[in-house]
Image: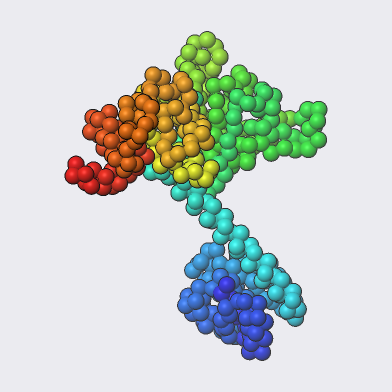
């Protein structure tokens, strides 16, 4: 780690340089404000030890200019005991810490190590945030059909609006939460909280207290104030999954929040204001629920500022091979397998199945098949009975069905060639399909055929 030490006393500079070099730091020195700024621009140190009193200026001014260059700069202020007021002011200006003169070197060393650890944690958090943004980039969602590209186009546009309410509709297992995360991590709120609430999994009274929080004494057992999930998600996004399952009383409170962006904690008298983007999702027919009196019509229109519909998997079959191969790769890594693909009859079964459970069901089927696979290919026999339907494996060639005798024994190479020919006949000359059945590459198949002049 690079460390810049700024102090007008040569003895202190050199002493601190020797000490921190012994601790593994790459140390640079500056004796005044002008040299400090020049060194910071030249070496971009991760950390600065900055004396507040310099011969050509004030350390606070240097701090401000460093923060202009790098808003995340880690600066530890060194001040005389009487300069504590200035040190507090420096903390407000963005200094990470301060230490008073005369200081103990070990105390200073501890402060630097503590700041180094904080820097490391910040960097790790930055990497995590960047990886999440990359993971949920729209281009990383596995789909190529026109319907899904339209969905992604709509989601990209609404993501950049920052605060428009969104409702994502579609059958269970279509990927509503995945799309919601993509909206959040591609929006201006991407570095702020993303809070998930499964409305169907919480009883009515618990859902209200989880969403809005409560004050001490609001009900039996409320021994202290609880901050609700709406406050936890402040400045970020809250995802209300299964919104169609919330109770009428919670619907009323949610409607008020959507209208005013404020709410009352249970037992509270003061209105709490937050800035939260709401994304809701449901697999229910809300229009039918409105007619039956189960869902408020005014809440329906408040949620439907920007509706997005995700089509079921059976309506975008061209995505099935893409998704299957994606899940295959994931489960290969998870289970330490080396399955290379799907036999043609297995893929045909996947493409023709109705997938009532949508992408989630497909993922579960691929996981099961990879666990069961012993060879390099997912065969139809590894798929659940309801998925493989009427598909059947390649029939055994006739020359293997009879008894073996001295007169019928063939060299292995000849036997292999005959079998390859039989499989090619079965596939109608489709080499890719034959390779899937045989578990070999096209290159190897070509070599075998070329050797026989075929």
Q: How is the image coloured?
A: rainbow
Q: Can you see residue 252?
A: no
Quadrant hosting residue 305: top left
In the rendered image, residue 80, in percent from the top left (x then y), is placed at 72, 78
- In terms of depth relative to the viewer, which is nearer, 67 or 167? 167
- In terms of depth relative to the viewer, which is nearer, 73 or 372? 372
In the rendered image, residue 281, in percent from the top left (x then y), is placed at 50, 28
Q: Residue furthest left?
A: 453
Q: Is residue 384 left or right of residue 443?
A: right
- In terms of depth relative to the viewer, which is nearer, 431 or 220? 431
**What residue appears at the point 35 percent right and 29 percent down from the top-left corner?**
400
**What residue appears at the point 73 percent right and 30 percent down from the top-left corner?**
267
Q: Can you see residue 333?
A: yes
Q: Residue furthest bottom?
A: 11
**What residue appears at the point 49 percent right and 79 percent down from the top-left corner?**
38
Quadrant hosting residue 15: bottom right
Quadrant hosting residue 440: top left
**What residue appears at the point 76 percent right and 78 percent down from the top-left corner?**
104
- In terms of depth relative to the viewer, which is nearer, 276 or 416? 416
Q: Residue furthest front?
A: 406
Task: For the C terminus, give its image quadrant.
Answer: top left
In the rendered image, residue 169, in percent from the top left (x then y), is placed at 45, 26
Task: For the N terminus, give its image quadrant.
Answer: bottom right
Count numbered badges in the picture. Answer: 0
In the rendered image, residue 271, in percent from the top left (x then y), is placed at 65, 35
């Amino acid at each position: 780690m690079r460390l810049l030490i700024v102090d007008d006393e040569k003895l202190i500079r050199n002493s601190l340089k020797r000490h921190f070099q012994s601790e593994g730091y790459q140390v640079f020195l500056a004796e005044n404000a002008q040299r400090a700024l020049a060194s910071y621009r030249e070496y971009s140190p991760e950390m600065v030890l900055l004396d507040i009193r310099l011969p050509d200026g004030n350390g606070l001014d240097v701090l401000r200019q460093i923060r202009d260059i790098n808003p995340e700069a880690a600066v530890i202020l060194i001040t005389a005991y009487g300069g504590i007021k200035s040190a507090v002011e420096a903390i407000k200006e963005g200094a990470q810490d301060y230490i008073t003169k005369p200081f103990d070197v070990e105390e200073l060393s501890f402060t630097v190590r503590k700041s180094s650890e904080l820097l490391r944690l910040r960097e790790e958090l930055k990497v995590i945030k960047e990886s999440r943004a990359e993971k949920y980039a729209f281009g990383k969602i596995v789909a190529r059909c026109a319907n899904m590209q339209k969905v992604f186009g709509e989601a990209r546009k609404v993501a950049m609006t920052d605060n428009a309410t969104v409702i994502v509709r579609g059958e269970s297992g279509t990927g509503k939460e995945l799309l919601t995360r993509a909206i959040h991590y591609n929006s201006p709120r991407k570095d702020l909280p993303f809070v998930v609430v499964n409305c169907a999994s919480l009883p009515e009274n618990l859902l209200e207290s989880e969403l809005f929080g409560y004050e001490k004494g609001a009900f039996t057992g409320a021994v202290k104030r609880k901050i609700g999930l709406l406050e936890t998600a402040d400045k970020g996004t809250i995802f209300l999954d299964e919104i169609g399952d919330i109770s009428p009383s919670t619907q009323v409170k949610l409607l008020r929040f959507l209208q005013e962006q404020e709410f009352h904690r249970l037992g509270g008298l003061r209105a709490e204001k937050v800035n939260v983007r709401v994304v809701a999702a449901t697999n229910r027919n809300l229009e039918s629920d409105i007619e039956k009196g189960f869902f408020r019509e005014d809440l329906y229109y408040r949620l439907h500022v920007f509706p997005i519909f995700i089509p079921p998997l059976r309506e975008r079959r061209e995505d099935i091979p893409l998704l299957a191969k994606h899940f295959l790769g994931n489960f290969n890594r998870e289970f330490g397998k080396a399955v290379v693909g799907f036999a043609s009859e297995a893929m045909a079964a996947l493409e023709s199945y109705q997938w009532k459970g949508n992408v989630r069901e497909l993922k579960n089927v691929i996981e099961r098949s990879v666990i069961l696979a012993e060879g390099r290919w997912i065969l139809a026999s590894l798929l659940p009975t309801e998925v493989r339907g009427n598909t059947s494996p390649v029939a055994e060639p006739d020359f293997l069905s009879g008894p073996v005798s001295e007169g019928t024994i063939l060299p292995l190479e000849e036997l292999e060639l005959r079998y390859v020919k039989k499989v090619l006949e079965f596939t109608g000359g489709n080499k890719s399909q034959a390779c899937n059945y045989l578990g070999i590459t096209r290159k190897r198949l070509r070599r075998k055929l070329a050797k026989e002049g075929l």
